[in-house]
Amino acid sequence: MTFMISRETENVSSIDDVVLAFKSLTENSERPYITRDELFANLPQEQAKFCCRKMKAYRDRNGREINNAFDYDDFTRWLFNQQPHATYSYHTSAVPSPS
């Protein structure tokens, strides 16, 4: 998957296409979050690190954070400016590559 998908990319016609691209990388293409390992397994290292730094941690319906899980839907909507920038939190810590 090409990571920084621009609005002009011919294979992407909507935000939903990008969300579905992330979802297709998850276990059984069903989860509403993507794990750190899935990002590193499917993206070039620098792009996976970027995602880990910029994506919000995923929280389930009860507000519990799932370890090493990221909210790709929120991230994609932020990338396409469908959500106020000020509400998006940045992860600034360094992200090591998986062992």
Image (cartoon, rainbow, N blue to C red):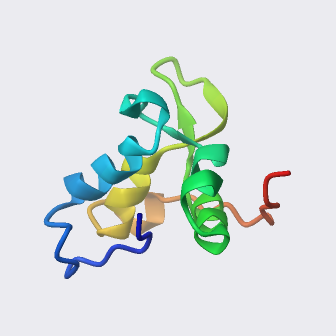
Res 12 → quadrant: bottom left
Q: Report the side of 61 relative to 68 (left or right).
A: left
Which residue is depicted at the point 49% across and 59% down?
88
Which residue is depicted at the point 46% across and 65% down?
86
Against 66, residue 16 (above or below) is below
Farthest-out residue, top: 62
Against 49, residue 39 (above or below) is above
Res 37 → quadrant: top right
Which residue is depicted at the point 44% across and 69% down?
3
Q: Report the side of 35 relative to 16 (left or right).
A: right
Residue 65, position as x, y percentages in the image:
63, 30
Quadrant of image for the N terminus: bottom left
The one nearer the camera, 99 or 70, is: 99
Farthest-out residue, right: 99
Q: Report the side of 80 relative to 11 (left or right).
A: right
Which residue is depicted at the point 77% across and 62% down?
95
Residue 10, position as x, y percentages in the image:
16, 76
Against 42, residue 35 (above or below) is above
Against 73, residue 82 (above or below) is below
Residue 55, position as x, y percentages in the image:
55, 55
The one nearer the camera, 40 or 53, is: 40
